[in-house]
Structures are given as C-alpha cells and as structure tokens.
Amino acid sequence: MCKSPIHNFLAELPKCEHHLHLEGCLSPALLFQLAAKNNIALPSPEQDAAYQSPATLAKRYEYFENLEDFLQCYYRGIAVLVTEQDFEMLAWEYFTTARRDGVRHAEVFFDPQSHTDRGVAFETVVAGFNAARSRAEKELGVTSCLIMCFLRHLPVSSAAQTMQTAIEGGYFEESRGGDHDGGQQQQQQQRAIAGLGLDSSEVGFRPELFVEQYRKGQELGLHRTAHGGEEGDPTYISGALDTLHVERIDHGIRLTEDAELLQRVVKEGVLLTVCPLSNLCLQAVKSIDQVPIRTFLKAGVKFSINSDDPAYFRGYILNNYCAVQEAFDLSRDEWRIIVENSIHGSWIQEKRKAELLGLLDDCLSKYADA
Ligand SMILES: Nc1ncnc2[nH]cnc12
Ligand SMILES: [Zn+2]
C-alpha cells in the first residue's frame, strides 16, 4: 500500500485498463508451476542462472536494461503456456488481481504469433483467454475485450497469416453474447476478438509495415491501436495515426518531443495508454516524475494509466496509480479527468460507459471530504 493520504480513493476509482499484455501477467511462481506441469525444460544454471527458482527469477526482473532485454525474458517465459487451461489460468490471475485493484473494464492484448510459432493452436489460446473473460464478467463484474497484437519484429507475412487464421476462424465476427448485467435485458453484439494491436521491438520496425493488416481490420469494423513512442521517436506515433488509422496509441510518451503532433493528438482526441512503471522499469524514464503526466493534463492530451506487464514491472494498475500520485500529487479533479477519459476512451457501449461514470460519481462523492 502506498503512503498517499488518498490511497483508498485511488483504490476505489472505477478503472478501465487499456494496456495490458496477458502474457505479461505470467508471474515467476506460475511460470515454474506450468513448466513442471507441462514438462517444459527451463534454462540450466550454465545457460541462465536466473531460472533456478521463482525467487531467482523475481530477482532477475528487478532490472531490465531496455525493452529488448525485457522482451527476451517475456518470450522465454511464454514457452510454458501450452494448454487451454494454462491460458485460462493466466488470464484468471489477471482478472482477479485487477478487480482487487478496482478494474471494472479491461481491454487486454495477446500475442498469438508467440504461441502459434511454437505449435500451439490459435484456438487453444483464444478459447482459454475467452473462458477467463466470461468468468470474469459473471463472477467479478469485470467486462473486457480481446485485442490481437502483431509482433512487429517478425516478418509481415507472419502477421498476414495470423490475420487470415483469425478471419477464417470467424474470430472477428459478431455473435450474440450475454449483456454484462446478466443478460436479462437486451443482448449485445460481441466479437471473440474486438481489435488489433502492434507490439514487441519498436525501433526499426515501423508501423507502416503493417498497413495491409490494419486496412483489412478497419474494413471488418475492428478497433485499432498500436504501440508507439515508447522507445521510438514521434514519427512512430504519426506513422501509426496516418497509415494504420489507429484510435489509440499505446505508451506515446515521446509525443512531448513534437509540439505540432501533440496538438494534433489533442484535436483528434486520440487516447494514449500510458504505463508509468513500465517506462521506469525499461529505462524510458529515470523516475516516474519524468513521465509526462502533467504536460499531458495541461495540454488536454487524453490518457489512461495502465500496467503493461504487471508480473515484470512491479505491480498491477493500482501500483501505477499510486506511483503517479506520489510523483505528481494530483488533485481529485485531475483524477476525475483521467478516469473519465479512460471510460470514454473504452471500446464499450454507451450504457456500460454510463454505469462506469455512475461508479465514478459515487467514488467522488464518498471521498469528497476525506
Ligand atoms: N512494453 C511493451 N512494449 C512492446 N511490446 C511489448 N510486449 C509486451 N510488453 C511490451
Ligand atoms: Zn505494451
């Protein structure tokens, strides 16, 4: 628990998470558990001393040199995920922890190529994640949608193949799903996969490479977002806006380096999905107060605060909210703006937005005098 006098207020804010990699929720404990169950050999002490125990692995995660250094651990860990139940367990760990942190709605990324390249079927991955999503909606009241990411360091032909698999499998088609309030009222249209994302190594793998996949996605009515301006310069942000026609930018902290682009982002109402602890852990900033939270608030840039890869970056969403509060001492009104923008920037129906805005009002009233 953080030392902020408004910790309880921060904890109870009805959060929407927009930048969360499900594979980034694989804790050292779960990694070792699944490796043993699935008979997956972990690196020997000669190969990598970090993989001796969950404790040594947790120690390894205390310092990453940069995005690339982290991604090596991330992709190595993913090898223990094999069965539908493994994917369900991983996502369930996320949803239960996120709900404890006040998350009410989550739009979560997954990286199908990191599984299909190892011979795990696309259907196994999506079925496991969607089982956890259904359960989270029923048992925890957390609504969610799934965002399929392309790995930008792999050949574009691999992204094209992944897109084809998803289209042919009907994962982008609308089907009647239960409404989030239990399904007694009208049913809402749901897709197994609601949107496209772009992640992995940024510099040298420009967004323009994936224009054809995003064009198809737009034609199919999918939502679109892309990582940009995490390590890459602002042209990675403008490239994603101009050629991929994204609705959001994931990270986007280097937007501050281009005043004109910043004005465009404000004017077009593009939401940035900022991940403060991730930026700190991957050395994108030296301290949290260098994340441009105040600059964005002052300029009217819309953003949400997110955890990215919580098993690797010192905590889930509430730790990120608390870290921001400790660094910036935001007012309740500034938190209201952040949470309102997170709700409005979510890919949900107006009715669900109204419910979440109602919860926000309740929280603001409860803590008005505290
Ligand atoms: N922070 C991040 N940036 C790019 N790709 C990722 N994949 C998982 N986490 C990521
Ligand atoms: Zn990310």
Image (tube, rainbow, N blue to C red):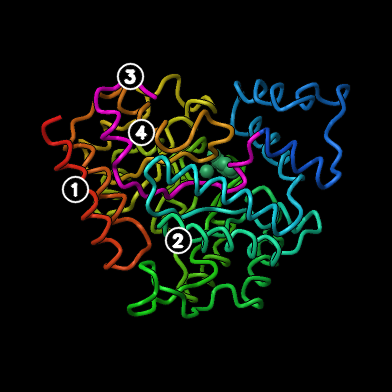
In percent of width and height, residue 286 lies at 45, 19
Q: Is residue 12 magenta?
A: yes
What's under tag 4, amino acid-wise?
Tyr
Query: Which residue shows up at 18% across the image and 35% down it?
Result: 332
Q: Distance between the residues labelled 4 and 1?
A: 19 Å
Is 348 inside the magenta-drawn segment?
A: no
The residue at 35%/57% (across/down) is 346
| 215 sits left or right of 81 in the view | left
Residue lying furthest left: 369
Task: Pick whichever of labels 2 and 1 is earlier in the sequence.
Answer: 2
Mark 2 highlights which residue? 137
> Residue 178: x percent and y percent?
44, 74
State left or right for residue 329 relative to residue 306.
left
- The residue beneath circle 1 is 362
Mark 2 or mark 3, earlier in chain: 3
- Are discs 3 and 4 less than 8 Å apart at CB? no
- Asked whether, in this view, residue 30 is left or right of residue 91, the answer is right
Residue 202 visible from this viewpoint: no
Amino acid under disc 3: Lys
**Relative to 32, residue 172 above or below:** below
Query: Badge 4: few (under 14), some or many (20 or more) residues near its Cα, within 10 Å?
Result: many
Identify residue for label 3. Answer: 3
Amino acid at circle 2? Glu
Q: What stretch is highlighted in magenta?
A: 1-27
Q: What is the distance, in whole Å, between disc 2 and disc 1 at their CAs?
A: 21 Å
Which residue position is annotated with label 4?
321
Where disc 2 sits, the SS reads helix
User: Quick one: label 4 or label 1, which is nearer the N terminus?
Assistant: 4
At a point 30% along the width and 40% down the height, the residue shown is 12
Q: What element carries label 3?
A: loop
Q: Quadrant of residue 113 in the image? A: bottom right
Q: Which of marks 3 and 4 is nearer the N terminus?
A: 3
